[in-house]
Image (spheres, grey):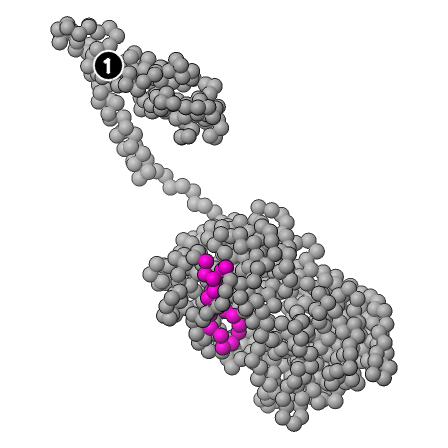
């Protein structure tokens, strides 16, 4: 083919071509050299080709002094009918040479005197120089224009909002991840039935689509081609083509904490929390091999490849550190054991062209210049956006593409909201405490409330207590990082809770008065959350994450050697466990049926089980007298089902709806509501606006730095 402005009519029509197409192109160039414009122009390629086929050049555009022979030559070269076009380029050479030498129209034939052959006018004398000089002149004009042109208007940054797909919500603390080419975004979404899966939103579309087979999938990352996606599911590292097809197994990953996919087809990933380092595996699948050793508790995670496809960034350090004193960003290299410390941060670091690192300090998104070739930081860090949340594993909820797009979440996530008193019909009675709190726990006498709140600056969480009669709030725990999930003792004198510190995850207990130091009840190797304390004060039920990344239910005896034992440990995901008032039964949630349902089983374990919910259920709670169970059904419906104990079996009544509200969610660890001892009022953690807040999408994000 060729460039549209120089294509012959037969080329534009898709017909066969011969040397006469080149003669046409020569005529176009000669016309442009003399007139300073193309013979055929248009706003689009289609317009140009239409002009080539249908229109004639502006024959008057050439200088008046152009010799007639040259005008005729151009006319012959630009004949649309190739039969009428100049047939051989040698004829053009002869015409030009004759014009330069003066042999042409109006000149004497060979044999006359040299004086007679001398060109008569100025145009004939300057034409050789003109033809040679025009090309140089045009080049010089272009150079001067480039050097002295007026600066173009800077490309502005545009900010917009991305809402959750219809009838579903963004998962609390789920990171949105942009594809490298900036055309797609993967989201972690929960539907009305409580099922979590990965969805893909093309950015040129108003809708998102669920990726089939990704239920309970998490921590997704893109392949360089922006078509394939890696993610972690049920203790495995998998991949999926977002344009269609089922997930494909790559290798085992007990509880993956991020991955990165190189241009050479190598995936590096963090297989689990704690003692594991980073591993690598071919993207086609195989056996993973260790490449970076651990640097301490809750160590290496969130790897990201740099542009060369060999070096990569990753986070390393404990979760319990205050501020940025322990967590660091390092650079590693495939095939090398060398690691280089870059900076301290409160999240992962992402690389973004034209040469920046993005990371969190507190809840502020920062940007700092970074030379990916020399692996060196340049200058200081500048703020880009504020109030960006991060997970307990210090995964900041932001992402960048290689095309200048930035997306981030804001607010406290859907796990927090406003506590509201409601009656059994769902009528709101009064608000309780400050907004943006979670995990309410009512004391046995119903007079005090324990809850979890994010510390100022977004740096960790602590437990607070409230006297409900007076409305007085007091802080119960004081760092160093995350203290969460309070559970009252049956007599209301002590509170058990989870503490995420530099030494891992511990279940602690402390006097409810706040006096004295906390006592360690259990040191866990993985995430552990107390759920309930038996009424005889002998056992604590707790949720603990297993090597597959799912949850099991354990019991912690508070007598003898205090050695925990598994109450329910299967290939499924279990949690939300609560003792019946008499301690004979445990209500819990499991996904063994394919969706989350509420079940009953005896305690100690053994002797059968009974399904309570129908069509989905989570967050069970007992009525104070043990005659009924409450739970949340899909769509935020609070349900009630009667429970009658008959010896070693129970009789479950048909569940019925009490009311429907936008309950906040917190996975399978603790309910977002509590019931008063008399069973007439409910304290509900109503999801705040931040729970459904849209994501912020920014184009050309580096322009934000120029405003400062």
Q: Residue 326: x and y, percent? A: 45, 75
Which quadrant would residue 37 be assigned to in this image?
Answer: top left
Q: Which residue is mark 1?
A: 99
Magenta residues span 265-284
17 vs 383: above or below: above
Can you say which quadrant of the picture contains the N terminus?
top left
Of residue 8 and residue 480, the one placed in the foreground of this image is 8
290 vs 566: above or below: above
Assess whether residue 355 is covered by the magenta stretch: no
- Tell me if I can see residue 402 in this picture: yes
Q: Residues within 10 Å of mark 1 (few under 14, many from 20)?
A: many
Seen as rendered, the residue at the extreme front is 286
Of residue 380 and residue 344, the one placed in the foreground of this image is 344
The residue under the point 71% across, 77% down is 577
| Image-based side of 326 in relation to 439, left or right | left
Of residue 589 and residue 425, the one placed in the foreground of this image is 589
Can you say which quadrant of the picture contains the C terminus?
bottom left
The residue under the point 47% across, 50% down is 403
| Image-based side of 380 in relation to 700, left or right | left
Q: Residue 120: x and y, percent? A: 20, 9
Which quadrant would residue 492 be assigned to in this image?
Answer: bottom right
Q: Residue 371: x and y, percent? A: 36, 59
Assess whether residue 274 is covered by the magenta stretch: yes
Of residue 475 and residue 326, the one placed in the foreground of this image is 326
The residue under the point 36% across, 62% down is 375
Q: Residue 491: x and y, percent? A: 73, 88
The residue under the point 40% across, 17% down is 82
As helix, strand or loop, the secondary structure at mark 1 comes to helix
């Amino acid at each position: 083919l060729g460039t549209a402005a120089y294509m012959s009519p037969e080329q534009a029509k898709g017909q066969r071509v011969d040397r006469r197409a080149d003669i046409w192109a020569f005529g176009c160039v000669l016309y442009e050299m003399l007139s300073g414009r193309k013979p055929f122009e248009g706003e689009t390629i289609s317009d140009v080709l239409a002009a080539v086929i249908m229109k004639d050049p502006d024959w008057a555009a050439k200088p008046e002094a152009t010799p007639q022979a040259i005008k005729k030559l151009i006319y012959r070269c630009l004949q649309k009918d190739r039969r009428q076009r100049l047939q051989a380029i040698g004829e053009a050479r002869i015409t030009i040479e004759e014009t330069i030498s003066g042999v042409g129209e109006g000149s004497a034939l060979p044999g006359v005197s040299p004086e007679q052959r001398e060109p008569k006018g100025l145009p004939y004398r300057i034409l050789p120089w003109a033809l040679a000089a025009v090309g140089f002149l045009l080049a010089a004009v272009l150079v001067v224009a480039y050097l002295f042109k007026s600066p173009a208007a800077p490309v502005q940054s545009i900010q917009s909002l991305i809402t959750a797909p219809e009838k579903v919500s963004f998962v609390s603390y789920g990171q949105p991840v942009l594809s490298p080419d900036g055309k797609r975004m993967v989201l972690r979404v929960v539907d009305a039935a409580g099922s979590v899966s990965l969805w893909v939103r093309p950015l040129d579309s108003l809708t998102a689509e669920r990726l089939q087979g990704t239920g309970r999938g998490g921590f997704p990352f893109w392949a360089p081609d922006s078509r394939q996606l890696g993610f972690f599911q049920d203790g495995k590292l998998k991949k999926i083509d977002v344009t269609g097809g089922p997930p494909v197994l790559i290798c085992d990953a007990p509880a993956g904490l991020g991955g990165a996919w190189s241009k050479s087809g190598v995936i590096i990933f963090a297989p689990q929390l704690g003692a594991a380092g980073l591993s690598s595996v071919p993207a086609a699948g195989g056996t993973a091999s260790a490449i970076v050793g651990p640097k301490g508790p809750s160590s290496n995670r969130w790897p990201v490849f740099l542009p060369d496809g060999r070096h990569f960034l990753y986070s390393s350090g404990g979760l319990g550190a205050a501020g940025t004193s322990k967590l660091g960003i390092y650079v590693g290299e495939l095939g090398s054991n060398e690691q280089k410390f870059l900076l301290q941060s409160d999240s992962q670091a992402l690389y973004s062209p034209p040469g920046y690192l993005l990371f969190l300090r507190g809840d502020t998104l920062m940007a700092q210049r970074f030379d990916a070739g020399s692996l060196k930081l340049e200058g200081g860090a500048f703020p880009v956006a504020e109030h960006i949340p991060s997970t307990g594993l210090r995964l900041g909820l932001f992402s960048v593409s290689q095309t200048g797009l930035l997306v981030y979440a804001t607010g406290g996530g859907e796990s927090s909201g406003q506590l509201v008193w409601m009656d059994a019909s769902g009528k709101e009675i009064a608000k309780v405490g400050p907004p943006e709190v979670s995990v309410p726990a009512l004391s046995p006498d119903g007079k005090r409330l324990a809850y979890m709140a994010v510390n100022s600056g977004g740096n960790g969480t602590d437990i607070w207590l409230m006297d409900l009669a007076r409305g007085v709030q007091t802080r119960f725990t004081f760092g160093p990082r995350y203290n969460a999930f309070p559970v009252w003792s049956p007599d209301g004198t002590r509170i058990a809770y989870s503490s995420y510190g530099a030494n891992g995850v511990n279940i602690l207990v402390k006097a409810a008065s706040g006096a004295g130091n906390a006592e360690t009840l259990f040191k866990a190797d993985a995430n552990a959350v107390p759920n309930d304390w038996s009424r005889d004060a002998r056992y604590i039920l707790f949720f603990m994450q297993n090597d597959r990344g799912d949850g099991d239910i354990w019991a912690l005896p508070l007598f003898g050697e205090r050695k925990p034992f598994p109450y329910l440990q299967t290939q499924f995901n279990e949690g939300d466990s609560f003792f019946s008032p008499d301690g004979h039964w445990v209500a819990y949630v499991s996904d063994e049926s394919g969706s989350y349902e509420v079940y009953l089983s005896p305690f100690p374990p053994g002797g059968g089980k009974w399904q309570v919910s129908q069509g989905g259920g989570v967050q069970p709670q007992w009525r104070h007298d043990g005659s009924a169970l409450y739970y949340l059904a899909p769509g935020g419906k609070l349900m009630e089902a009667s429970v009658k104990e008959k010896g070693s079996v129970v009789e479950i009544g048909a569940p019925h709806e009490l009311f429907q509200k936008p309950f906040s969610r917190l996975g399978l660890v603790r309910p977002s509501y509590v019931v008063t001892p008399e069973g007439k009022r409910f304290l509900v953690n109503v999801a705040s606006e931040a729970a459904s807040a849209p994501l912020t999408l920014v184009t050309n994000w580096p322009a934000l730095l120029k405003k400062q």
